[in-house]
C-alpha cells in the first residue's frame, strides 16, 4: 500500500522561508558581507526566494551564487542520477564573506560536504552557514543546519520530495513510501 | 543521462543526442577553467595516458590540461622518445600500457583506424586524437561547441570548409558532425584536394573559394600541409595562396558577421592572411579555449559521469 502525505503546502513553505530570512538577518546582524549560494537545482530557487525576502526586509540586495556539486560528489561511479551537469556560477569572491548555503532537503549530509569543498575552492569565506527547507535526519557526516524550515523525522524507506513552482509547477513537500 | 560508450573514435558513429550531451556537458566545464583554483576533484585517482605517434602542441596540451583540471594523473608518451624507436609495435606498446592499469588512453596515430584497433583489444577507454586522414572527433566537437556558443545553434547555418579536404581529418569529422546537426556545409579547394564522391557525405563542392564562402555564416580554413608540396598535389604555396587563401578581398562574399575558424597550426599568408587570422571575425583562440572543456567533458563522461 502506498502512503503519500503532504507535510507542507505553499503557505507553509512561504512562512518558513520568511522566518528563515529573518533568522539569517538576525544571526548575521544584517546583510554586511552576506552572500547566498543555492545548490542546484531546487536550492537555487529557494535561495532566490530568500534573496527577495531579505531585500524586502532590509532594502538591500544580497549577491546570489549557484553551485552544481556533481563534480565534487563521492559517488560518481555508482550514482545513477539522470540530471545533466549544470553550470556553477559564483561571479564574486568569497574571501571574507558570510556564505549561506541553501538546499531543499538535508539528508545524509554528503551533498553539503561536497558543496563546502567546492565553496572553499572559490576562496576563504569568513563562515559558512546552512539553510534548508527540510531536515529529514539520517546524517552520515557530522553536519547540521543553521536554519531549518521544518524538521521531518522520516524512516529510511520513505521518500521526501520538495516540489517548487519554478521547476515543478507547484509548491509542496510530500513524504511517501518508496515505490 | 549517461554516455553509453567505452570509446570516442569518431563523429561518424555518434548520434545527435550524444553530440548534444557532450556539448552541453562541455558548456558546464568552461567555468572550471575560469576559476582561481582551476581544478575539481572529479577524476581523482584516475590515470590518463596520452600516446602520441604524431607531432602535436594544441591537442596534447589540451588533453593534458583537461585531465589535470579534473584531478586525473596524466602521462605523455611521444613516439620519438619511446620504445617505438626500438621497433615495438603499436599493439605491444598498448598491451604494456594496459598492464599498468590506466583508465583512459588518448591516441594520435598517422594510420587511420589505429584507435579503433586498440579499442577492440584494450579494456580501457580510447579517445581518438586524430588518426591519419580519417577522423579528429575532439576537434569537430570543440568546433561545434564554439559555433553554438557564438551563434546559439548549428542547424540552418551555412558553413564553408576550404583547403585540403582530401587529407584532412578535421574536415571529415566536421562534415559528419555539422551535417548531422543540421548545418549546410560546402567545401572548396583545388581539384586534387577534393575527394571523389564527397557529395555523398551531404556537402556541396565549389571550385572557387568565392562561391563557397558566399553568404557563409562560418568559414573554416584548413591548414595546408606544406609537406605535401612535394607530392605534386599543388604546384606551389604561392599559387595555392593566390587562388584559395582567405583574404581581405574575398571575405566580402561572406556574411558581414561571418566567423572565421582554423584548427591550427596556421600557415600565415598561405591559407589565411594574418590580418584576418587576428581580426575581429576570428574565433580561432576561442576554439582552443573550448577544446579544454570538450576534452574535460569526454574524460568525465567516459569515466562514469552520469550527467
Image (cartoon, coloured by chain):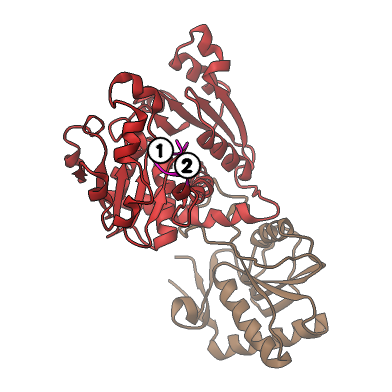
Chain colours: A brown, B red
Instruction: Write down the residue under mark 1.
Output: B8
- Is residue B172 at least partly visible in the picture? no
Mark nearer the N terminus (2 vs 1): 1
**Chain letter for mark 1:** B
Measuring 27% from the left and 60% from the top, which residue is drawn there? B156
Q: Nearer the viewer, mark 2 or mark 1?
A: 1
**Chain letter for mark 2:** B
Instruction: Write down the residue under mark 2.
Output: B302
From which residue to which does the magenta span run?
B265-274
Secondary-structure class at tag 1: loop
* Left or right relative to B73: residue B273: left
User: Is label 2 in contact with label 1 (beta carbons under 8 Å)?
Assistant: yes
Where B268 falls versus A14 (above or below)? above
Q: Main secondary structure of the magenta part?
A: loop
- Residues tagged by mark 2 and mark 1 found on one chain of the structure: yes
In the displayed orientation, state which residue is furthest to the top: B86
Q: Which quarter of the image is occupied by the N terminus of chain B? A: bottom left
Picture quadrant where residue A107 is located: bottom right
Q: Is residue A146 magenta?
A: no
Where A37 falls versus A25 (above or below)? above
Where is residue B38 drawn, in percent x and y? 66, 50
Measuring 43% from the left and 39% from the top, which residue is drawn there? B269
Secondary-structure class at tag 2: helix
- Is residue A112 at least partly visible in the picture? yes
Where is residue B133 drawn, in percent x and y? 33, 29
Where is residue B37 drawn, in percent x and y? 70, 52
Amino acid at each position: 500500500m502506498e502512503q503519500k502525505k503532504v507535510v507542507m503546502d505553499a503557505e507553509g513553505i512561504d512562512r518558513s522561508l520568511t522566518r528563515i530570512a529573518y533568522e539569517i538577518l538576525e544571526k548575521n546582524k544584517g546583510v554586511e558581507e552576506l552572500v547566498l549560494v543555492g545548490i542546484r537545482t531546487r536550492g537555487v530557487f529557494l535561495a532566490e526566494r530568500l534573496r527577495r525576502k531579505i531585500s524586502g526586509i532590509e532594502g538591500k540586495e544580497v549577491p546570489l551564487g549557484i553551485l552544481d556539486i556533481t563534480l565534487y560528489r563521492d559517488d560518481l561511479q555508482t550514482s545513477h542520477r539522470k540530471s545533466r551537469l549544470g553550470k556553477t556560477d559564483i561571479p564574486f569572491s568569497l574571501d571574507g564573506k558570510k556564505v549561506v548555503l541553501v538546499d531543499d532537503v538535508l539528508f545524509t549530509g554528503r551533498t553539503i560536504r561536497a558543496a563546502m569543498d567546492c565553496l572553499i575552492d572559490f576562496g576563504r569565506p569568513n563562515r559558512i552557514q546552512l539553510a534548508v527547507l527540510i531536515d529529514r535526519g539520517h546524517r552520515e557526516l557530522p553536519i547540521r543546519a543553521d536554519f531549518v524550515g521544518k524538521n521531518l523525522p522520516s524512516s529510511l524507506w520513505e521518500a521526501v520530495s520538495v516540489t517548487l513552482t519554478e521547476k515543478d509547477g507547484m509548491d509542496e513537500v510530500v513524504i511517501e513510501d518508496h515505490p | 543521462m549517461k554516455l553509453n560508450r567505452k570509446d570516442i573514435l569518431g563523429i561518424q558513429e555518434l548520434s545527435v543526442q550524444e553530440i548534444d550531451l557532450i556539448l552541453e556537458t562541455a558548456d558546464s566545464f568552461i567555468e572550471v577553467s575560469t576559476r582561481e583554483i582551476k581544478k575539481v576533484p572529479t577524476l581523482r585517482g584516475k590515470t590518463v595516458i596520452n600516446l602520441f605517434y604524431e607531432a602535436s602542441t594544441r591537442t596534447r596540451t589540451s588533453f593534458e590540461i583537461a585531465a589535470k583540471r579534473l584531478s586525473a594523473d596524466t602521462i605523455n608518451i611521444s613516439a620519438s622518445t619511446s620504445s617505438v624507436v626500438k621497433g615495438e609495435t603499436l599493439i605491444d606498446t598498448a598491451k604494456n600500457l594496459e598492464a599498468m592499469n590506466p583508465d583512459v588512453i588518448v591516441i594520435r596515430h598517422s594510420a587511420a583506424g589505429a584507435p579503433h584497433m586498440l579499442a577492440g583489444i584494450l579494456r580501457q577507454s580510447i579517445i581518438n586524437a586524430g588518426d591519419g586522414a580519417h577522423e579528429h572527433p575532439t576537434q569537430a566537437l570543440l568546433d561545434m561547441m564554439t559555433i553554438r556558443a557564438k551563434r546559439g545553434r548549428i542547424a540552418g547555418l551555412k558553413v564553408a570548409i576550404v583547403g585540403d579536404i582530401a587529407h584532412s581529418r578535421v574536415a571529415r569529422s566536421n562534415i559528419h558532425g555539422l551535417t548531422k546537426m543540421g548545418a549546410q556545409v560546402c567545401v572548396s579547394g583545388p581539384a586534387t584536394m577534393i575527394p571523389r564522391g564527397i557529395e555523398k557525405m551531404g556537402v556541396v563542392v565549389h571550385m572557387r573559394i568565392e562561391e563557397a564562402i558566399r553568404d557563409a555564416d562560418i568559414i573554416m580554413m584548413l591548414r595546408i600541409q606544406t609537406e605535401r608540396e612535394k607530392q605534386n598535389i599543388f604546384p606551389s604555396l604561392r599559387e595555392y595562396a593566390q587562388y584559395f587563401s582567405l583574404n581581405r578581398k574575398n571575405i566580402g562574399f561572406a556574411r558581414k558577421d561571418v566567423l572565421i575558424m582554423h584548427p591550427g597550426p596556421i600557415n600565415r599568408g598561405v591559407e589565411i592572411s594574418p590580418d584576418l587570422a587576428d581580426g575581429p571575425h576570428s574565433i580561432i583562440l576561442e576554439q582552443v579555449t573550448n577544446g579544454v572543456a570538450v576534452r574535460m567533458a569526454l574524460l568525465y563522461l567516459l569515466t562514469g559521469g552520469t550527467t
